[in-house]
Amino acid sequence: MISAGRTKATRANARASTGPKTAQGRAHSARNARRHGLSLPVLSNPALSEEVEPLARDIAGAGAAPEILELARRIAESQIDLRRVRSARHDLLAGALCDPDYGSPAAERKNAKLAIEADKLKAQLASSPHLTPLISSLLTRLESSLQSSPEGPQKFVTILADMTRQLAAMGPV
């Protein structure tokens, strides 16, 4: 027998976890499945479904039995799906790599913390003039760190680290 308190707590938890509450959150959630279209089967897209039959014939070979041709169709659909996943991953990474102002969410959180620390150092500087050279040096290094963004291989590593979950959700390659 479940107690009344437990039932009440379970219902409260269910109400709290039923998805986005704001109109903006619901709109964002509604767009999730359309982001890359990988949740749709190949045959639901007319352009892709036209590619299945010729590829299946190439795989099965000329004069293949109907059973072999049906298996070849399934292989062709899988090949087209793999191509779609690779293309979606490529587009996702290329978009981030081409963005000159790409900011890693993790780096932005770190920079926000560093900015708070810089403000604290500035306050100490005002109250302790004998620390002026040391704190000024630290502030200069801190501010240059806040303004720099990763480039080259470091940028690619940062993007991969940030997008690992999204890439994994697209399925195996």
Image (cartoon, rainbow, N blue to C red):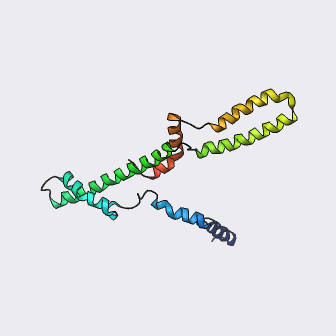
Q: Residue at x 56, y 37 (%)?
A: 150
The quadrant where residue 121 appears: top right
- Residue placed most toward the observer, 102 or 19: 102
In the rendered image of this protein, does residue 65 appear above or below residue 89? below
Q: Residue at x 59, y 63 (%)?
A: 25
The answer to whether residue 105 of the structure is visible from this angle is yes
Name the side, left or right, on which 44 lies relative to 70. right
Number of marks present in the image shown: 0
The answer to whether residue 19 of the structure is visible from this angle is no
Name the side, left or right, on which 51 lies relative to 119. left
In the rendered image of this protein, does residue 10 appear above or below residue 117? below
The quadrant where residue 125 appears: top right
In the rendered image of this protein, does residue 106 appear above or below residue 56? above
What is the quadrant of the N terminus in the image?
Answer: bottom right
Q: Residue furthest front?
A: 100
In the rendered image of this protein, does residue 71 appear above or below residue 8? above
- Residue placed most toward the observer, 102 or 116: 102
Q: Residue at x 63, y 44 (%)?
A: 108
> Can you give x and y, in whole percent of width and height, for residue 101 in the image?
56, 44
> Can you give x and y, in whole percent of width and height, for residue 166 in the image?
49, 50
> Can you give x and y, in whole percent of width and height, for residue 142 in the image?
70, 34
> Can you give x and y, in whole percent of width and height, for residue 113 in the image?
70, 42
